[in-house]
Amino acid sequence: MQEAATLDRRRCPLGWDTTAAADAYRDRDMRLAEKLIFPAVLQRLGRSPGPDRLVLDVGCGTGAIAAQLAGGGEWTVQALDPSADMLDIALADRWHPRVSYRLFDGRTVPWLAYDSVDGAVCGLVYCTDPDDDRLAALTAEIHRVLRPGAPYLLADLNPATTGVAFSTLRHGEPGAGYADGDTVPTLLRRRDGTTMTSVTHDRSLDRYRSFLTEAGFPSPAVDLPKLPVDAAGQDDPAETRTAPYMILTTHV
């Protein structure tokens, strides 16, 4: 009976705003994100030019990007997430003196003034939210608080790679077709080699662009980072041939 229950939990997709999702996400295999997303975000955002420069990590989850921004980039970070369970893990695992973790509603940051933030990063968030209206409101709110010229970096799953089995994830079933807004089962690898199935939502690159442009941002530059063959550590994994993630960069 225990084996059957374990199998059921593995196959049942996890919603993100749950204790179970936070516990499972804590143990996810982050190797691809660490190699493809984190360095690219730090490079495009740059190092903080001063101790009072503030960057937002929107949808920070367990704090992986926030820790990079505060450490490698030396930014002061406000890290926001709608999941109290994710924030509890972030505080326990990735406390940093320049990072403040804060619960928010997923669409507004009313405590921040207009033109008061020097940069914003949003990693693997849009794909987890089924509500286009909430994402549109969030994007407009990010635009509101950023100073003129400040960058917004949006990193997410590459919608052109649905069904591709990468070494640490697979977004969608092989051979399946998905339309904007469809629920997509996404397989994530844990550090111990087991997997969990999470819930994401399909959106085209054009839909991502429209979130940004409708909020007042210019159309973004699109980067599709791949892993160099000599850094792969195995024979020709999918991430050496196609990009599992995309990074959109725009400015106010």
Image: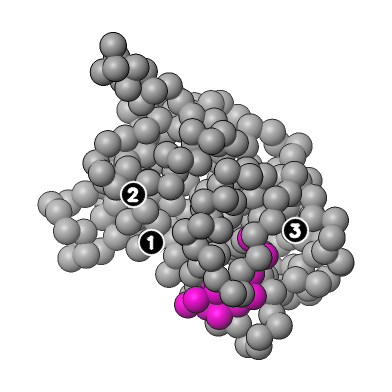
Q: CA distance from mark 3 to mark 2?
A: 29 Å
**Who is closer to the viewer here, 162 or 170?**
170
Is 107 placed above or below 178 here?
below
User: Which residue is denoted by mark 1 in the rendering?
Assistant: 34
Look at label 2 and name its amino acid: Asp
On the image, the x and y values in percent for residue 133 come to: 76, 37
Residue lying farthest to the left in this orientation: 235
Question: What element does badge 2 sit on?
Answer: loop
On the image, the x and y values in percent for residue 112 come to: 82, 64
Look at label 3 and name its amino acid: Ile
User: Which residue is denoted by mark 2 in the rendering?
Assistant: 29
User: Which residue is denoted by mark 3 in the rendering?
Assistant: 142
Q: CA distance from mark 2 to mark 1?
A: 10 Å
Residue 77 within the magenta-colored segment of the rendering = yes
* Residue at x-position 79% and y-position 55%: 109
Q: Residues within 10 Å of mark 2 (few under 14, many from 20)?
A: many
